Image: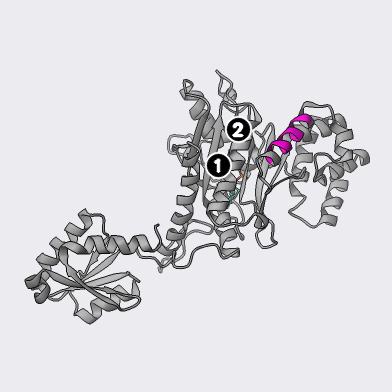
Amino acid sequence: MTLSRKPLKGMRELTPARKRVEDYIIKRLRDAGLAYGFEEYETPVLEPLELFQAKSGNELAVKQSYNFTDKGGRKLIMRPELTPSVARMVAALGELIYPVRWMSFPVCYRYERPQRGRVREFMQFNLDILGVSGLQAELDVFLVLRRIMNSLGAAPGQYSIRYSSRRLASEILGSCGMTEEEMAGAFALIDKKDKIKPDEWEELVRKTIRDERNAETIMEFASCGDPDAPWLCEAAGGTEAYTEIVKFSGMLKDAGITEARFDASVVRGLDYYTGIVFEVMDTGGENRRAICGGGRYDNLVGMFGGQKVTGVGFGLGLLTLELFLKTYDLVPDGISGKHPADIFLAVYSDEERDFAVNLAEKLRDTGVSVEIDISCKNLSKQFKIAGRKLIGYSAVIGPAEVASGRITLKNMTSGTQTECEVSEISRILMDKNLEGESD
Ligand code: HAM
């Protein structure tokens, strides 16, 4: 039997070239979090199924998940997201210094139909603030998002942070007399608005919502793109939820976050959101999946019993972000081909091998990354390997080099050669690295 060369459908298999691009993105994400004092943490990949059934809702926890019974009869799930685990961890620790600012890079699993921007195994960047009820936490989270997009070279017109409020949506739908269950159905419909054609969506709303007035309200609300719109003001003016969204809108303006815009069709698919919700979207047509989604969840931690701790944060998909960057040509040239070794040491014969191995170790002690020949092939074959790997510099260690202690550094791109003392190699390579890309 011949084994398949393909990984399971939708699973995350990254070549070193793809991994280098991902690492480039991870560095920017981590640096943005660190700039605001976020600390990194980890939670398990395998979790009890009931944790996600209770917190994320049945759609994600059962229909869209990898879940199974283990040998001990426990019902388990491969985490489809991180937020319930974060809430549990905070509830268990209790005595934390609030506000907690935490970030993590979980690999998550969802049993979905793979398509552009949607796979079954994917890495997210999660960033959450816990223990602050005011809108200042939301503002901080939006500032981090803008910093991330800026640091990756995205221009303001290329993406938008669309935001709305779950509370406001509940207020509007509740005032029509909808029950909790009907409201959940209406949220699911609103969530579909930008995923299908406008006329198909309208038809779906009319078909699903029997009461004509309620269907009109849903359509009117979901099309609202301005918190000061007369319709919205009339429908919700004077409520706490409305006052909050108007205030937040003003805070975003004052902070100069011009990429953010109110869009009532953002309600988010997960059950636990209680306040402001948001998504980062590509404003062009090519990437229709959200780059990032998040919001306020004030009741999650309290559901574990004990202290109530409020929270707000987001999950950002590394794949959706990478697709966005590629669309706008924002992955710097050469990142995917950049080999980690700074220099390749070619070895003339076995006579010089001890000297070369020693030299390589000394260079590594000073922070230089060295790949030394271990193929023991002739020099031209060794250089062919170094050239194909796109290693920046090379040097031959032969009898003359061993005798004189001087070597010739060759720039593999330009072909220029620099003769130097063995003791100078490290400094010269470091200087050259500093002149080029610092990553
Ligand atoms: P989510 O909207 O389910 O939210 O996922 C967040 C992001 O993860 C999405 O915007 C997308 O970029 C990425 N993502 C989700 N599913 C897939 C998939 N199948 N393939 C590739 N990427 C995917 C959450 O997960 C919340 N827990 C976020 C959160 C954190 N809310 C508060 N804190």
Q: In the rendered image, which quarter contains the C terminus? A: bottom left
What residue is shown with label 2?
Answer: 137
Residue 220: image location, x then y, percent: 87, 44
Q: Is residue 273 left or right of residue 106?
A: right
Q: Observer-nearest residue: 417 or 14?
A: 417
Residue 362: image location, x then y, percent: 17, 57
Q: Is residue 211 left or right of residue 156?
A: right
- Residue drawn at x 56%, y 57% is 153
Q: Quadrant of residue 432?
A: bottom left
| Magenta segment, prevailing SS (helix, strand or loop) | helix
Looking at the image, residue 74 lies above or below residue 331: above
Q: Observer-nearest residue: 43 or 21?
A: 21
The reply to whether residue 69 is in sight is no
Residue 16: image location, x then y, percent: 40, 62
CA–CA distance in space, label 1 to label 2: 21 Å
- Residue drawn at x 73%, y 35% is 166
Q: Is mark 2 within 8 Å of ligand 1?
A: no
